[in-house]
Image (tube, rainbow, N blue to C red):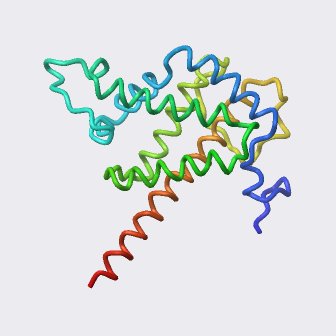
Amino acid sequence: MKLNCFGRSSERSMELSSDEMQAVRDSWKRAKEREIGKHILQALIERKPQFKDYFGIHVDEKKDDVFSCREFQLQSHRIQNFLDTAVSSLGFCPIGNIHQMAYRIGQIHFYRGVNFGADNWLTFKKVTVESVTNDCGSSGSSVIDLKSVPSIFPSNSSTVVIIGWEKFMSSVIREMKRGFLDEARRNCHDEETRF
């Protein structure tokens, strides 16, 4: 087991503290009132237009508004509903239940052909954290060295919100990637045994 400079295992340092869980839940209450799923998906598409293809948003941009089309609305609701379920479960259900949900979504991504590269996962995480924490009083930057957390920041700081979301999204994305990869391996093995 590797230890970071604060003497904690790297896996344990990614666990959400009770203050971070509460900060994530509180910030989510405010964010979902702003239809945050739409903001997240719009920001993803603006930063990386290929996200339209990943989410099945096929419109003629010369004639139609991407952000009002049916596919955009559907996908933004899916993003928001997943995050709502996951965040609402924080502290009330074991974190493993949230991880199982994320893992299953990763499996579904495999069957739908949604194969994100590492850069797209990082963009998804960054956009989500920025969009949700936009009104928590931060400077808008979510670049934080998580190895130097949690003891240097007071628990009432908006930084706790950002750290909580960074940790939360890291664990969710890790499980989504794991679900995708396990399903790809299983299908690869199935293909090999057919012959």
Q: Residue at x 68, y 43 (%)?
A: 145
Q: Can you tell which quarter of the image residue 165 is in?
A: top right
Q: Residue at x 34, y 36 (%)?
A: 48
Residue nearest the viewer, comparing 104 with 158: 104
Residue nearest the viewer, comparing 187 with 17: 187
Residue 42, compared with residue 86, is above or below; it is above
Residue nearest the viewer, comparing 29 with 149: 29
- Quadrant (top left/top right/bottom left/bottom right) for the N terminus: bottom right
Residue 49 in the image, given as x and y percentages of width and height: 30, 34
Residue 12 in the image, given as x and y percentages of width and height: 77, 54
Residue 132 in the image, given as x and y percentages of width and height: 57, 25
On the rendered structure, is 116 left or right of 13?
Answer: left
Residue nearest the viewer, comparing 195 with 116: 195
Residue 86, compared with residue 117, is above or below; it is above
Q: Can you tell which quarter of the image residue 111 is in?
A: bottom left
Q: Residue at x 66, y 31 (%)?
A: 88
Q: Residue at x 44, y 32 (%)?
A: 78
- Quadrant (top left/top right/bottom left/bottom right) for the C terminus: bottom left
On the rendered structure, is 88 left or right of 150?
Answer: left
